Image (spheres, rainbow, N blue to C red):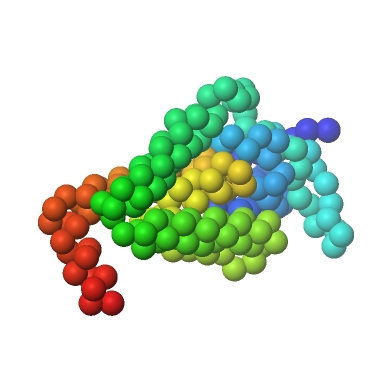
Amino acid sequence: MRYQGRISTWKDDKGFGFITPNGGGEQVFVHINAFSSRQRRPEGSELVTYELTVDGKGRSQAQAVAFVGTRPTPSSAPGRSKLPPLFAVCFLLLVVVTVFTGRLPIAVLALYVVASVVAFFAYAFDKSAALRNQWRTQESTLHLFALLGGWPGALAAQRLLRHKSAKASFQVTFWGTVALNCGAFGWLLSPSGATVLHSILRAA
């Protein structure tokens, strides 16, 4: 049997909230994993339908949750375009070319590789924590990794792990960090940027 209610409370950083049934009554716990479609994350106040189950402690919780008035649209799901991964691959190829042609030191390529690996595992840790209702990695930390050059790894994590790819506010900030990082990379290719970079490396 399916019920209908409204998401009265939602904690996106922890991945859970509560549904108030239509007509009133005790609130029902709902976890992000209970939603039938992962193409859209709840923000609060959405009308949903759900099936009612009971956990091991006898508490009510929602399963097979679906938003009212929406239809699945896999072809237009947010974050599914092929352009972002293609852009990341082309950017990394550009980094490799500039390093091997001597325009930039190999330390720049090493920075992008290391930062991307760290960012990927940070996303993996955050998703695991969300599923287990444990302490989460702050979004500002994830954005910092992207800003420092780890955005290709962060993008890979968003696609492969399906984490943070549907939250609009997060994506706006994320692509802002990508733009800033790409701008900084372009500056390093300029004469003034190259001079500053080589001065820093000599001092180190």
Total marks placed? 0
Name the residue nearer the viewer: 61 or 175: 175
Name the residue nearer the viewer: 198 or 116: 198
Image quadrant occupied by the N terminus: top right
Residue at 70 percent across and 46 percent down: it is: 33
Name the residue nearer the viewer: 122 or 77: 122
Determine whether, in the image, residue 9 is placed left or right of residue 133: left
Image quadrant occupied by the C terminus: bottom left
For the question of whether residue 122 can be seen, the reply is: yes
Name the residue nearer the viewer: 80 or 71: 80
Residue 159 locus on image (x, y percent):
56, 41
- Image-quadrant location for residue 64: top right
Residue at 36 percent across and 59 percent down: it is: 106
Identity of the residue furthest to the left in this view? 192
Residue 141 locus on image (x, y percent):
44, 63
Residue at 61 percent across and 44 percent down: it is: 160
| Image height of 185 relative to 73, above or below | below
Residue 19 locus on image (x, y percent):
65, 46
Residue 46 locus on image (x, y percent):
56, 38
Identity of the residue furthest to the front in this view? 101
Identity of the residue furthest to the bottom in this view? 203
| Image height of 203 relative to 104, above or below | below
Determine whether, in the image, residue 149 is placed left or right of residue 85: left
| Image height of 105 relative to 180, above or below | below
For the question of whether residue 69 can be seen, the reply is: no
Residue at 85 percent across and 62 percent down: it is: 57
Determine whether, in the image, residue 173 is placed left or right of residue 34: left
